[in-house]
Image: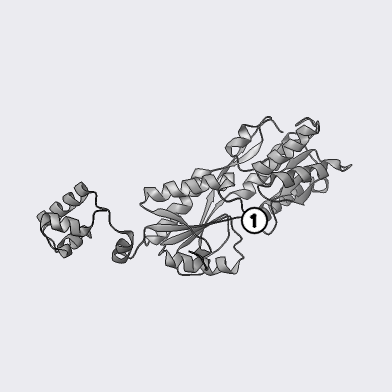
């Protein structure tokens, strides 16, 4: 690995002169600075990240706090895609992304302590229970924080238009003639689930079908639970005409049960997913779903956080549009 000592030795200059030139100081003669920079490039010199942090007071590194109730990690299709966008967007602005955990080596630590230990410039929080004291301490710290699908007045929040998404699905089902609709929600300790459930109750009431509709609490991205909940729903005498699921993974679990048990979709029962991940459009029959803008969610939360890190004053709330994808299941 090339060091400033190697460059100084080659050019017969002091290490102090080389260091000041590489760090952009104005007290080095222009011709000397250019010669140092050119030699550094030729020799493949890369600045030490810790030294760079001490000089610039920045690590050029963003922390990502990501987990969910199912511990699905990067197997969570929707958020795995969002995280890829975060990483790509950060790179375009010259930043790296590091995963925050509750450990430093073998020692248990808080998220905030981990962030400070890594000298992170800011934090993105995605799909985690923000009621946890450890997460609350991070949000309330002096570090810039941005969240996806959350509601904190003092932090940057980038949210999908979840209310529009649910209302679009219900209106679509209503226009197709369905009146008895069961909505399997995500877990209701979740901000998004509460928002979507309220939207479902509001729109079914406005369409005068609320007495025919119902909600059942489920879990995001749990296809096995969705399979069992669908089995239970369809075993009842007063079966729904349509079932809405919290996401596409859950909808595919419900679809599996229905197809295995001889139901014709959508003739016997219609189903809808949510998220619009690629697999939703590859299964047969193709899912009707709400497509979230993965690129916009990932890039927006990243760029807004970096704007704050760099001293700008970005918007606290950003809403990302959604789109109804009409498939073959309604």
Left or right of 306 in this view: 204: right
How far across and down, in percent of the image, does residue 308 sit? 41, 60
Of 323 and 33, nearer the camera is 33
How far across and down, in percent of the image, does residue 150 sit? 58, 58
Quadrant containing the C terminus is top right
| Residue plotted at (77% across, 39% down) | 242
Confirm whether residue 11 shows in the render. yes
Of 12 and 157, nearer the camera is 12
Q: Which residue is mark 1?
A: 69
Numbered disc 1: secondary structure: loop
| Residue plotted at (64% across, 56% down) | 69
How far across and down, in percent of the image, does residue 223 sit? 70, 44
Left or right of 15 in this view: 73: right
Left or right of 71 in this view: 303: left
Residue furthest right as drawn: 237
| Residue plotted at (15% across, 58% down) | 8
Image vertical order of residue 24 relative to residue 87, above or below: below
How far across and down, in percent of the image, does residue 124 sit? 49, 57
Image vertical order of residue 167 relative to residue 310, above or below: above
Image vertical order of residue 71 relative to residue 145, above or below: above
């Amino acid at each position: 690995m090339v060091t400033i000592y190697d460059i100084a030795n080659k050019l017969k200059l002091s290490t102090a002169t080389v260091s000041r030139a590489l760090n952009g100081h104005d007290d080095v003669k222009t011709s000397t600075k250019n010669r140092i920079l050119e030699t550094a490039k030729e020799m493949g010199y890369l600045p030490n990240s810790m030294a760079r942090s001490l000089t610039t007071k920045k690590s050029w590194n963003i922390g990502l706090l990501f987990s969910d109730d199912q511990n699905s990690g990067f197997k969570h299709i929707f958020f795995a895609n969002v995280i890829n966008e975060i990483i790509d967007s950060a790179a375009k602005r010259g930043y790296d992304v590091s995963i925050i955990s509750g450990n430093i080596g073998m020692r248990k630590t808080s998220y905030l302590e981990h962030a400070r230990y890594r000298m992170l410039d800011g934090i993105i929080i995605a799909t985690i229970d923000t009621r946890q004291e450890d997460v609350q301490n991070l949000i309330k710290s002096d570090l810039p924080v941005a969240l996806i699908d959350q509601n904190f007045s003092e932090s940057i929040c980038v949210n999908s238009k979840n209310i529009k998404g649910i209302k679009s699905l219900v209106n679509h089902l209503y226009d197709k003639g369905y009146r008895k609709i069961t909505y399997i929600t995500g877990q209701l300790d979740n901000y998004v689930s509460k928002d979507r459930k309220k939207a479902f109750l509001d729109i079914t009431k406005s369409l005068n079908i609320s007495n025919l509709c119902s909600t059942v609490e489920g879990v995001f991205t749990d296809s096995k639970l969705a399979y069992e909940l669908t089995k239970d729903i369809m075993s009842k005498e007063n079966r729904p005409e349509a079932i809405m699921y919290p996401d596409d993974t859950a909808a595919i679990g419900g679809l599996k049960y229905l197809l295995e048990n001889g139901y014709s979709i959508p003739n016997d029962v219609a189903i809808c997913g949510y998220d619009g991940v690629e697999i939703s459009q590859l299964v047969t029959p193709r899912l009707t779903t709400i497509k979230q803008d993965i690129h916009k969610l990932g890039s927006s939360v990243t760029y807004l956080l970096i704007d704050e890190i760099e001293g700008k004053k970005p918007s606290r709330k950003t809403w990302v549009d959604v789109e109804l994808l009409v498939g073959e299941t309604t």
